[in-house]
Amino acid sequence: MAMVKGGVQNRNQQPHIAFLCSPGMGHIIPMVELVKRFVDQHGFSATLLTFSNFSSPTQSDFLGSLPPAISSVFIPLISLDDLPPNSNMETCLCVLTNRSVPHVRSVLQSLHKSNKLVAFVPDFFCPDTIPIAKELSIPHFLVVATNLAFLAFMLHLPHLDETTTCQYRDLPEPLHLPGCVPLWGIDFIDPARDRTSEVYKWILRLAKGYVNADGFILNSFENMEPETAKAFRDGKHGPRPAYAVGPFVRSDMGEADEFGCLPWLDKQPDSSILFISFGSGGTLRIEQIREIAFGLEESGQRFLWVVRTPNDAVKNGTFFGLGKQDSPISYLPEGFIERTKEVGIVVPSWAPQVKILNHKATGGFLLHGGWNSTLESVSHGVPMISWPLYAEQHMNTVMLVEGIGIALRPKESADGIVERREVARVVRDLMVGVNGERMRNKVKELQEAASSALAVGGASYQALEEVANKLKKNALVSE
């Protein structure tokens, strides 16, 4: 039995939407921001379905703080005990959502009876639940918490699978999708790197399920991907509409500053600090942490670095939570903190990212290419060094570097390590180089475009309004 938390169950005076979000705060935060827009701007009430698997106290507190017009429903724990212990994140999420279909059906049937349910909106890991909406004859849109280029790739993946046999990294030419930057196989989404793997089979299943949606709602905006947006409008990626309604990024949510980052930033020159964080899920090898440290020292630039406990086995070792954090500072080179204390600060595990990006001292962001962090950086006008680790981050990085021109990408050695000299080179280039200045001007333009897109009458506002009006009109017809 699903568990309901908060909100008002019977809202017959308002059209009601049910949203389904896969685990991970990186998925939940942007989904909640989208839900709030439907509620605050367009008069809907909502139920947000989330999973008990991989939940955390932080997630529970966050969902418990939602306004009364939004209820939370927790799907009961689903057994994943039969999965191999080394199953990766994408496999776990796909299996979890697939096995949750009966529970989701039960919740939607109940909502359909007791509320004026006008739509079901699952996220991009949950297309297996779309047939439930078809059974109930209600509209269904898939939320893609990343960009149009990723959606274009997923819609094309079944065709690519049918027409090629080699590993994608061995394709002789880059993939040319309408409106997108050419993409070599080595930069495809991480689960597609080995076509013989279990995770590839699940991702292919997801991609095939996307065509069952009535349309797509994306966390992007027109000026971020103008050519890709035009290709979707022109029907070059199929007949289903794609609504770019972003950027929806988190507010600071009252983030605590446990280690005094903000007072330290207050003492630094404007635009002088490189903020370094690999997201809530990203983990680096021990050797890589040491190379970053030596590279920062060699660069001579000011920095604020969020260090997490390394993981030599996987690059997303904290995706479902911080996990074990055995003094990440201890993995830094001996004497590093003392030698750099005049120009840098090292913070273990976590820092108030939104507040840091919004600070006038922050002049650059070294990140993992995750889309949430990317949009937060753009929304605050901060240029980037994009260092991809997993998921679709390589694809995002290609867009940021080669397509938009607001990020640099460090070069890896043959063993996958970015060496200290390369770290120093890209850091200097971003913070004091000509390329950095050019990118800083470009990202400031995008910052203004993002703000305009979200304003009343802006492209993103109108896109969401179009979805809302369709749902309201459909509700009137069905009465």
Image: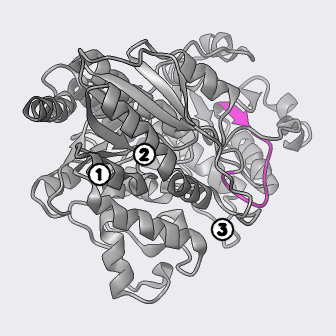
Q: Residues within 10 Å of mark 3 (few under 14, many from 20)?
A: few
Q: Earlier in the sequence, mark 2 or mark 1?
A: 2
Q: Main secondary structure of the magenta part?
A: loop
Q: Which residue appears at 69% of the width and 26% of the height? A: 57
For the residues labelled 2 and 1, say whether their Cβ atoms are less than 8 Å apart: yes
Query: In percent of the image, x 76 and y 48: which residue is there?
Result: 289
Q: Please tell me whether mark 2 sits on a helix, a strand or a loop.
A: helix
Judged by depth in the image, the label closer to the viewer, 1 or 3, is: 1
Marks 2, 3: nearer the viewer: 2
Question: Does label 1 or label 3 sit earlier along the sequence?
Answer: 1
Q: Residue under circle 2?
A: 105
The magenta region covers 303-316
Across and down, in percent, residue 349 comes to 74, 33
Residue on which disc 1 sits: 135
Which residue is at 66% across, 58% downward? 418
Quadrant where the C terminus sits is top left
Q: Residue furthest front?
A: 113
Residue picked out by circle 3 = 413
